[in-house]
Image (cartoon, rainbow, N blue to C red):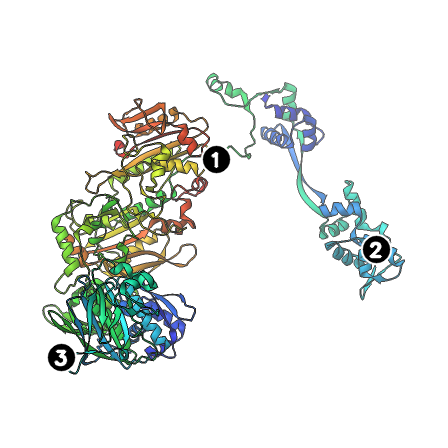
Amino acid sequence: MPVVDVQPDELRRLTGHEDKSDEEFKDDLFALGLEFEGVTDDGAFQLEFGPDRLDRLSVEGVARSLRYQYGDARGVSVPNTNDPDWTFVVDDEVPDERPYVTGAVVRGVDLDDAALDSLIQLQEKLHATMGRKRAKGAIGIHDLTMLKGDVLSENASGNSITYTGIEPDGDTFVALDSNDELTPAEVLEQHDTGRKYADLVSEYDRYPAIYDEIGLFSFPPVINGRRTEVSTDSRDLLVELTGTDQWTIDRMCNIICYALAARGATIEDVEVQYEEGTVVKPDFEVETKHVSHDRIETVLGVELEMDEVIDLFERSGLDADAELGEETVYEVSIPPYRVDVLHPLDLVDDVGRAYGFNELEPRYPDVGTVGQRHERSRLEDAVRTSLVGLGFEDLLNFHMISEEENYARMDVEVGSEYLGGGEPASITEPYSEDYTMLRTWVLPSLTMVLENNTHRAYPQDLAEIGHAAHRDDDENTRVAEARHVAAVLARHDATYEDAKARLAALCRDFDAELETPATEHPSFIDGRTAAVVIDGEEVGVVGELHPKVIVDHDLELPVAAFEFDLSALA
Amino acid sequence: MRLPESQVAVLNAASATDERTIAQLAEATDQKPETVTGAVFDLRDEGLVSVTETAAESVELTDEGVEYAEEDLPEVRLYRAALDVGDGDAVPMGQVIGASSLGGPQVDIALSNFARKGYGHIDSGELAPDAGADPDADEEAAALAALAAGESVDADVLDQLESRQLVVRHERTIRAVTLTDEGVTALMEGVEAAETVDRLTPELLTSGEWEDVEFTEYNVEADAPEARGGKKHILRQTADRVKDVLTGMGFAEMEGPHADADFWINDCLFMPQDHPARTHWDRFALDVPPMEDIPEDLIDRVRDAHLNGVGEDGDGYHSPWSEDFARAIALRGHTTSLSMRYLSGHEVGELEPPQRYFSVEKVYRNDTLDPTHLLEFYQIEGWVMAEDLSVRDLMGTFEEFYSHFGITDIQFKPHYNPYTEPSFELFGRHPETGELIEIGNSGMFREEVLRPLGVKCDVMAWGLALERLLMLMYGFDDIRDVHGTLCDLDLLRETEVLK
């Protein structure tokens, strides 16, 4: 979940509520769904919230939401924009992988330290969320006065910059936080930021690059040039965003523009000249969606007046026009900084939040259904009850295990025909060497529990009914899953007979016919091992664990054991 | 007459004319006083003896009392030291205390009793012994000596000693026994000792000999050897309780694969494929070929929902959607994959509202292993399908469910999930500590989830980790102690069962 750092003094200034205490703000923010997580070293609130309202990733956005909550603002607000002076030319050298660009010119910004910090934070947070770590969208903000536009012949009054693609070593520039003239390829190798984002472009044939008349000034999505670095002295800014999806970078741009406009800056349109045509950005178009009065009432479970609904919409920063007809439908206008409204139901949620969900009276839904346990779950429960009755401690182990524990320490070879020898369903990139596959059988887990509890009193009679799985490409999921019944008896005089006696008692409980023809299994002692044959089908193994398995698990007493497929008792 | 051996001995030792105490009888019969007491009461019930009870008091010296009986009272030692040091004159207190070799609390005891008992005066830090005082005539010292010798002392002095906590008094009952006329008659007619046996044997029962034997008495208060049965794992017990509650509320249990296609785990849930939770760091991808058999029409509808949204005003995600990505197989990160399979109609056939379903099954998440997070844990998942469900129905259902676990005062914090809208984090009041704690995540499934599955009505759902419920109910602070191969058998054996 995103966390945004917000200075309470900035919040006071931007909301116009200079007299609000920190505690009052915390309560108001919680009501918005922004949870107070703590304070930074320099006194900023750390606020955590769901990743839907990304327009709240800066103090300006949080303040805007609070103003709606306080009733200081109502309805949709769109900043005025001035006519374009700058053009972004997208030429045909642009990398195919990153074809989109957008942006804006922002004039008359007043960046004190707090405002600059907030802008940098907003940029970083947008990169981390919507920008998918800059892969989907990356923002560059430049001091406009440091740029010299190419004069476009078609538009004598305007300036232009060019978004293009260059060979990795096709040009040089001085990157931020550096003093060296480096090629983009050298930046990826030598610059800290370059190394961090190298993976994003290293597969590209041509690297994204932005030029003005002076030369290369930005290497998106990796780093800007030092020439156009923004400082507290900057008054006019050029914002550019490149990415893999036009909508995504347009919305990221809108969120930035709204934040700067909230501090009194003027937004100026730019023209983006694609090969297929020219478009004007930023895209502040107000979209509409339709939602019926009836749907709002059913979702909230309360009856509402039309005026009340419109009021709730406006308090959410939306506008609503009622269209009367057979059923009342609202045409709802959505401001261009919202990135979370995919469906009319998202607007119903806004109404609910403005109404206050906790104001609603809970009621138990008046629909009748019949409850029941699944057949498999009932069987498992019945077998577990029998095992406990036979004196076993019921255990519960992880389904994930290491190959070492599952096979080698039990002396079973991968791919052998013995119980537990099935091919592993392996985890592609395991994070821990202890958990690299799903266990193919349960006895390795029980033996590990014995190993970890040698300081506890004996006898240790342990049982587990648990999940076991192995790779099987004939299955739709490519994994054959089963529940196994496994038990160990660790006691100074444990014998084959002890295990068989309990196995037989269990089978009797389920009216199942047990036979135990002699067999071999590498985990067990030859001549003291039998196949578990239930109702004529071989489903498992019973015997005395082999001394090498026992000793390998640091045990100093005999262990009798059995394991078989639970479905045999169905 | 046949009586148990102990009763025969007591009857023989008792007299019709002289009262004999239990202690005397015990000595005379060479039996333990508690055995004699038992025999006496049995004989009284038979009418063979009569018992009189008198209250008696005994006095015992405390450890401190014993010490003073042997070494003199502190005030006496102080007085003697003062005489030695000052030769009858007043002397500085510190000097006297040093000479008396009194230490710790004894100094205060000595000083407070010194003046009280007229051994002298204390003034301006000087101690003036009264030459006329006679420590050898100290009543309290004499009484201590007398008590140590087993003699009785005057009640006033005893009160004084008790207030100084040098003695404790015990009240006890002295029972004296005399033979009744019936007792005398019985003795004259002859009383034999009955045979006593240690174990009741099959032979005794079948031969009828049990009627003539007495059973030796056991020390029934002594510890017995430890007995241990098995029991259901505490997490299973908790799961069973959850299943009981939910089936009672009309929910039916779901079942399905742990390894499943991302399609069922995430795509059906309207999780965009470039969502951070779907990157390889968060999921356990399995090294197996992709799933082949997924209904094609369902794939088409789900893809369309992701790309274009659902309904006239719906928008899709501005993210790429790849079928190969959807077919890849991983361990499920939530059991919502089961809900998707059931809601799609491919698990138990098309579902008509109303329906309620649940599962309490394992899910797999790449989280850091710590006392409260495991790589695999149990998720409680439940959903209700009906026409026109409201947020109020959702709230009412959760209030009912959590009340069965003592969790009340449920609060709903609006929240964001990609697959539900509205969504709520659930908070509730801890039954023991009263804290407000997070107890689950919930919401109404989005139309982008339901419509591609073919569901035309509303479905509300919620999820919660079973381990979290267990930790709340039991106060475990490290879940690894109970779940997994590092579990502590003693903890499992000794944990109280769920009532």
Q: Residue drawn at (68%, 44%), measured in percent from left and top?
A: B170
Identify which amino acid the numbered label 1 is placed on: Ala
**Considering the numbered disc 3 on the image, is that residue within a helix, a strand or a loop?**
loop
Q: Which residue is mark 3?
A: A153
Identify which amino acid the numbered label 2 is placed on: Tyr
Identify which amino acid the numbered label 3 is placed on: Ser
Q: CA distance from mark 2 to mark 3?
A: 122 Å
Q: Position of residue B406 (x, y in %)?
A: 37, 53
Lower sequence index among marks 3 and 1: 3
Are there few (<14), some (14-19), or many (20+) residues within 10 Å of tag 2?
many
Residue A346, which numbered label? Answer: none
Tell me which chain the residue with mark 3 is part of. Answer: A
Q: Residue drawn at (24%, 25%), measured in percent from left and top?
A: A536
Which tag is nearer the camera, tag 2 or tag 3? 3
Question: From the image, which quarter does the C terminus of chain A lie in?
Answer: top left
Compare residues A258 and A88 and report the one nearer the observer.
Answer: A88
In the rendered image, the vertical position of residue B94 relative to residue B198, given as above or below: below
Looking at the rendering, which quadrant does residue B421 occupy? bottom left
Q: Which residue is mark 1?
A: A457
Q: Which residue is mark 2?
A: B79
Q: CA distance from mark 3 to mark 1?
A: 91 Å
Asked whether residue B412 appears in the rendered view, the answer is: no
Compare residues B200 and A19 and report the one nearer the observer.
Answer: A19
- Residue A431 in the figure: left or right of residue B118: left
Asked whether residue A55 appears in the rendered view, the answer is: yes
